[in-house]
Image (cartoon, grey):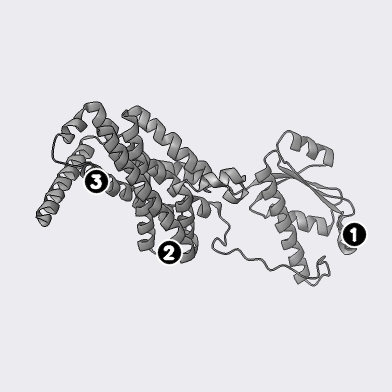
Amino acid sequence: MRSASLREKGVRIRAMVRKETLQILRDPSSLAIAIVLPVLLLLIFGYGVSLDARHVPIAVVTDSRTPASEGFVAGIRHSPWFVARSYPDIHSAISALKRQDVEGILWLRENFGRSLESFRTHGAHVVVNGVDDNTARLVEGYLTNTWQTWIGIRNLRGRILTFQPVSLDARIWFNPDNRSRDFLIPGLIAVIMTLIGALLTSMIIAREWERGTLESLFSTPVTIGEILLGKFIPYFILGMSGMAISVAMGHVLFDVPLRGTLGVLFLTSALFLTSALGMGLVISTVSKNQFVAGQIAIVFTFLPAFILSGFIFDIHSMPFFIRILTHIIPASYFVTILQSIFLAGDIPGVILPNAAALFLFSLFLFTLLVRISRKRIL
């Protein structure tokens, strides 16, 4: 009796999956959301968003041309970070900075050479445009790095120029090239899949309500759980296809290293996509209107994921209250997982707690979904 009941459930679920699959094939908008939209968003954000600063225009003022000053200026000109522009005096360089023609000033004063030989440090001045504090910090860091590199080269040539008795041997793990794209693309995939997952399912229940076909389904022996499962499975497969395309683009097109295993990547992606689809189903059940459901999905899923997931803004730098809010954003856990899998590999101490959080989110959302659906029917 029990096996017959399970067989009937299986038949009804298969029928619901087939019905929803045919609906997807008739309406290509779902295919566009799942396949085309992630490709477009990855291309736009992947090429458009970068935290690197290259070819920054910088004013160079040299009061006295000496071998030391010429050597340091040559180091600046050969740097990939700067476009050095010579100015005759500091006043014209300041005017250029005020006009925002340059982002900084390197001023080598007349006593620059003598300052090097006498270990004094006031022979060179750096002024950085602080209107954009991120660019200002990058320019300052690049100039410091160029200066230390130049000093190191002169030391290797046998000159006594070092200002520090101990040199710091610093190394960058997991992203040795310090490319912001390697850091941004995994987070971008998480944010995009949040939007795709919620949009895919946010309108399917609302569409049934608008067309009046949900009442017809309730008059059949199919249960609420079977309806939800029948609607979930096709969109889950569709979402995982979009996820696979996004991962392939990140690794092949944007050259982001993938140091973890594909099995862990897609297992955690399945957990995240389940929670994203669950959010869309909850929105769709509550709103009963496709347009409203789509708007709610964008406002309550994409925007929080973009701002509060740690994709761009560091969560640890946020105020305490905002940090608490980030714990209810599933994308914040998935961003951490993806950055670990792509850049560092399968680290259980990072992946397991975040995967457990995604599992709890999925469990909560589908429990809530079943309760809301029953209440709406009764």
Q: Earlier in the sequence, mark 2 or mark 1?
A: 1
Q: Between marks 3 and 2, how big is the CA–CA gap?
A: 31 Å
Q: Is residue 221 above or below residue 206?
A: below
Is 13 situated left or right of 190 in this image? left
Extreme residue in the bottom direction:
158
Front one among 369 and 183: 369
| On-image quarter of the C terminus | top left
Q: Secondary structure at mark 1?
A: helix
Q: Earlier in the sequence, mark 3 or mark 2?
A: 3
Residue visible at 70% across and 58% down in the picture: 145
Q: Which residue is mark 1?
A: 114
Q: Is residue 290 above or below residue 172?
A: above
Quarter of the image holding residue 197? top left
Mark 3 or 1: the one toward you: 3
x, y percent for residue 67:
82, 59
x, y percent for residue 95:
78, 35
Q: Which residue is mark 2?
A: 260
Residue visible at 75% across and 71% down in the picture: 156
x, y percent for residue 82:
67, 49
Front one among 300 and 8: 8
Front one among 289 and 257: 289
